[in-house]
Image (spheres, grey):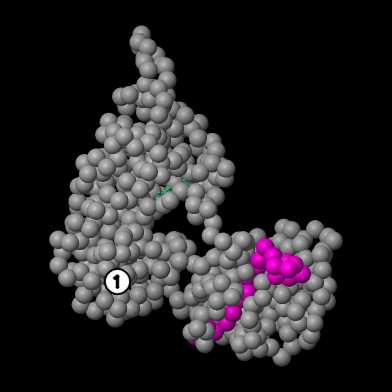
Amino acid sequence: KVLILDFGSQYTQLIARRVRELNIYSEIHPFNKIPTNFQEYKAVILSGSPFSVRGEQALHPDLTNIRGEKPLLAVCYGAQYLAHFSGGEVAPSNTREYGRAKLAFIKENEAFFKDINVGSQVWMSHSDTIKTLPTNGVLIASTHDVTNAAYRIEGEDTYAIQFHPEVYHSTDGKQLLENFLVEIAGLNQDWTPDSFVEETVAAIQEKVGNDKVVLGLSGGVDSTVAAVLLNKAIGKNLYCIFVNNGLLRKNEFESVLNQYEGMGLNVKGVDASQRFMDALAGIEDPELKRKAIGNAFIEVFDDEAHKLTDVKWLAQGTIYPDVIESVSATGGPSATIKSHHNVGGLPDFMKLKIVEPLRAIFKDEVRRVGATLGIDPELLGRHPFPGPGLGIRILGDITAEKVRILQEVDAIFINGLKEWGLYDKVWQAGAMLLPVNSVGVMGDERTYEKCVALRAVESTDGMTADWVNLPYEFLQKTSNDIINKVKGVNRVVYDISSKPPATIEWE
Ligand code: XMP
């Protein structure tokens, strides 16, 4: 496996994903927390950073056991770090070094540049430049503007590049990573969805033995894949609980429950809609709603889990981005924008041990593992849906009637996206019920009814998002359908705000 030391670059996760796309397992760790099982890693990559090696805040990794001991690839900040502190010179650059550049020189017979030619496009993003190479540095590539674009250290398997191979705009970036990891570091490319399933099933069996495990299913991709993996490992010792909080999409509870049963999962559906409605009565504030929904979920899940005897483990669908320790710009925690309630976040009093079979993988890898396990592609391709469900898409207080209206609107919108072949082009979509009435006219009558907002966004991880340019014909048809078919709605608007500064959900 490969160790990626993070210096806080926005691209660090991309490095991990590119390496994994080569079927080589990689892990991200903060630059100052080198794991104790360090010997198990066959190569090390240093990420970029928002910091300057010349600044007072420069981050100093301890490379004593790494440099010269293991194959090392230093990217951007990493490359500058090696130069600056090992006899070279780094200075502010006076030419523009952002964006696309082309390799203008590549040293001959370098395994590092195997199958990569002069003219190859690379992605630059830095404001410092390496003026002189470190001691024993050998120049191996330049662009038109940047002479020291890549170097290696004589007598070591240490390579350093000023550009970002992990970014798609570096057209041979993946080839370069492969050259480093396979040609130079000698890693095998055998980490595949199949091998992941095999290893994870064995690890689960080893960990939980004959103990019983309880898991909360949400209908989403992560909890489903986690359940199927566990089911493969321990079969009937896995007890799944699928709670209807009354805030799911139209008919979702019944249809997903059927699907789960069809997959052979040992699953119990619990309809607790009324309990959630009671807990939410009169609450308007978004964060208080999240808390009420989160608490009600814990109560229901706890009641159900107590009906099972001898359960020792709680399984969760936690994925890798949730557990990567980040290097923040300020050193402090980032502000809570919205408190996310995720299915499975349970209090300590349950005293269960935790098993998280997806902890090591990214969302796209979860989907690939799901496909290997034979899970229905439609289920794997589902849009993300927030834990509090329609509860945070009904602005203001929640009533059963409002839930009904929004379920109808949402179903027309989502089914329409599917019929028009747009569903897979959208990352997430949904409808919001606004807490305002507006005047309309239907036939000869004046109406004074609800307004709904439709939202469809493109994104990769939900952190940033842009609204989708849906065809006018589709919006027109959808709007007509909603107003004609859903009693209580007389106006439809489309949300054209990106994130930031807006968020995806309205609450
Ligand atoms: P925002 O609205 O913060 O949403 O731009 C980003 C992503 O997170 C989802 N989301 C939630 N998911 N519990 C969840 O499990 C929540 O309370 C919650 N709030 C937002 C949202 O649907 C989007 O995918």
Q: Amino acid at mark 1?
A: Lys
Residue 456: x and y, percent?
Answer: 47, 41
In the displayed structure, would residue 487 be above or below residue 322? above
Residue at the far top in the pictured view: 444
Tell whether 447 sits left or right of 500: left
Q: Nearer the viewer, residue 212 or 198?
A: 212
Q: Nearer the viewer, residue 73 or 356?
A: 356
In the displayed structure, would residue 464 be above or below residue 478? below
Q: Which of the 4 quarters of the picture holds residue 102?
A: bottom right
Q: Nearer the viewer, residue 313 or 360?
A: 313
Tell me which residue sits at (19%, 51%) in the image: 270
Q: Residue 467 in magenta? A: no
Q: Which residues are magenta?
A: 40-58
In the displayed structure, would residue 353 be above or below residue 384? below
Residue 496: x and y, percent?
Answer: 54, 36
Q: Quadrant of the C terminus?
A: top left
Tell me which residue sits at (27%, 64%) in the image: 349
Tell me which residue sits at (46%, 48%) in the image: 338
Label the magenta part by its dominant secondary structure.
loop
Q: Residues within 10 Å of mark 1 (few under 14, many from 20)?
A: few
Q: Which of the 4 quarters of the picture holds residue 7?
A: bottom right
Task: Assign a secondary structure to mark 1.
Answer: strand
Instruction: Establish whether ligand 1 lies closer than 8 Å to the Cβ of label 1.
Output: no
Tell whether 487 sits left or right of 186: left
Reading the image, the residue beneath label 1 is: 353
Tell whether 458 sits left or right of 174: left
Q: Is residue 183 visible?
A: yes
Tell me which residue sits at (36%, 60%) in the image: 222
